Amino acid sequence: MEYLLVHFPRSRRVLIDDEFNGRTEEVIELEAGRHMVSLGPPYDNYTPDQYTIILKDTSELEPREVSFELQS
Amino acid sequence: MSFNHRFGAVLACAVFLTLQGCAHYPVNEPLSPGQTTTPYRFNPQANSNNTDSLFVCLAFSGGGTRAAALSYGVLEKLKATRITWKGAEKSLLDEVDCISSISGGSFTAAYYGLFGDRIFQEFRDRFLDVNVQSTLIRQLFNPVNWVRLASPYFSRIDLAAEYYNDHVFEGKTFASLAEPSRRPFVILNATNMVNGERFEFTQEQFDFLVSDLNSYPVARAVAASSAFPFLLSPITLKNYPHTNFVLPKDYDMGLGDYDDNRRRYYWAKNRAIYMDDTKLPYLHLMDGGLADNIGLRPIEAAYRRTSGFIRKLMNEGKIEKFVVIVVNAHTIDTDEISDDESPPGLFTVASKTATIAMENYSVETIETMKELRTERVKAQKNIAACQKKLDQCPGATPLPKFATAIDPYVIEVNFEALKDPVRRNLFLSLPTSFSLTKEQVQTLVDVGPQLLEESPDYKDFIQELTAP
């Protein structure tokens, strides 16, 4: 399995491939490969809109990290 | 020949051809854009009495009435097992969230999915204690059926499905299984003859046929799941035009995963064949055992796959204990081929070729599920151990953790676990058929609970569940 950590200043649900699949600042366990990462609602206060990543060679202690910024 | 005789012969031919032309299997319906009924997918909103925090999945293997009776015995045991979870007293069966099944196991799974606890009053008289095999054979001697079977659109499997529909499943369709908040989610599995891929009777799979599963009879899905090669013919489904079909994101991403996730790539590629509906206007399904004879693969996929319903609940922090119980009615074939120096005949070779691989990957599948369990436990332990070290460093930032630490179990019910060699061999030599004696059925119903109780993994789970 592969591991992802999504940063955002607020606790928010995480969308993986258009489906809710965990929360920010928690280790999310996923299958390897391409994934589209985005955040749950409200959809208009973060940037960028989404990341497309390839998950591989991660571990629970060294997850792939992506960060979203708060946009006012 | 007189005029009357000739007229009679012509009339008989006309009636024959008319009847023959009328006989057609029930065709699956297309998806309608304005569909208002709940589609048959896993429903994350559980019934109030069934929590997500204790998430229990059952896998029922193939093996004719033997498998159906063994899995029924396990259901009886789960019903009788009283637990207290989150302050509520209930039976362990009330916490079963999904059942994935193959062939004979699909009869038990579908019956429990449709009728719940009624199974314990009705299923033995309706199915387990009935000589289904001879009933189906008798139907072949009915002259009306000769005419129907002469149609190219009606075959032996359709006769079997009609019997299951009328005498076992009360004509129910998947709409009954899809009732809002109904658990367990039952996944009946067959095999696509084109690519050997497992075919699930779920709306997610039917989406790729642009077809509505809700209107489809459960009996036909069970018939497809148990369409044993040679004895029964395949079940046919129509693949509708893919106009306005919206690709799931998961599928889109999977097609680019050749280098990074071969499993997901081939999953997407196997779905891709349905998109070409002009090249594949129909598909033909056979016994689910040809792709996976223990029914564990859909549960493994729901756990492993990013879009899997178990995976999403885990990452959302909903599951605390995850339990998989595999009811494996595997037996050992009596080897008669090796007695003879001369090679086996054409029929034996053809039959063996079609069925010999059915058990090849069962052990591997169970071991893979156990490895996934171990991987999760190790990952949780690693994070906890590192955090413990970090706690000794003043001002250190806490490590990110999983949404919840999950306590997973993979439990197997298997005749091989019987300690008494005589009893073990007795069960391991039971035939795969839909005609067992009442005594054989009773011994199978009795041995299921015993095997479950004696399983070390089940003992651990119950002990952990009842620990203060």
Image (cartoon, helix red, strand yellow):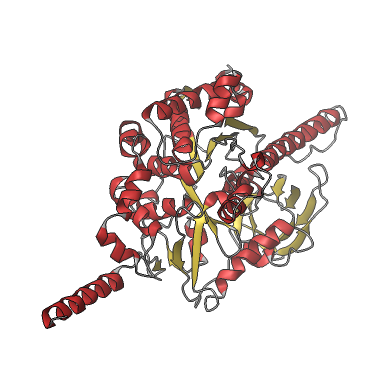
- Residue at 15 percent across and 77 percent down: it is B5
Place of residue B191 in the rendered image (x, y in percent of width and height, measured from the top left) = 54, 56
- Residue at 49 percent across and 24 percent down: it is B447
**Which residue sits furthest front?**
B1
Q: Report the side of B55 relative to B138 (left or right).
A: right
Q: Quadrant of the C terminus of chain B?
A: top right
Q: Is residue A44 visible?
A: no
Compared with B34, B95 (above or below) is above
User: Would you identify the image quadrant in which residue B82 lies?
Assistant: top left
Depth check: A64 or B355 in front? B355
Depth check: A32 or B11 in front? B11
**Which residue sits furthest left?**
B4
User: Would you identify the image quadrant in which residue B424 lies?
Assistant: top right
Compared with B281, B343 (above or below) is above
**Which residue sits furthest bottom?**
B3
Place of residue B364 in the rendered image (x, y in percent of width and height, measured from the top left) = 69, 42
Place of residue B184 in the rendered image (x, y in percent of width and height, measured from the top left) = 45, 42
Place of residue B147 in the rendered image (x, y in percent of width and height, measured from the top left) = 29, 66
Compared with B283, B48 (above or below) is above
Q: Quadrant of the N terminus of chain B?
A: bottom left
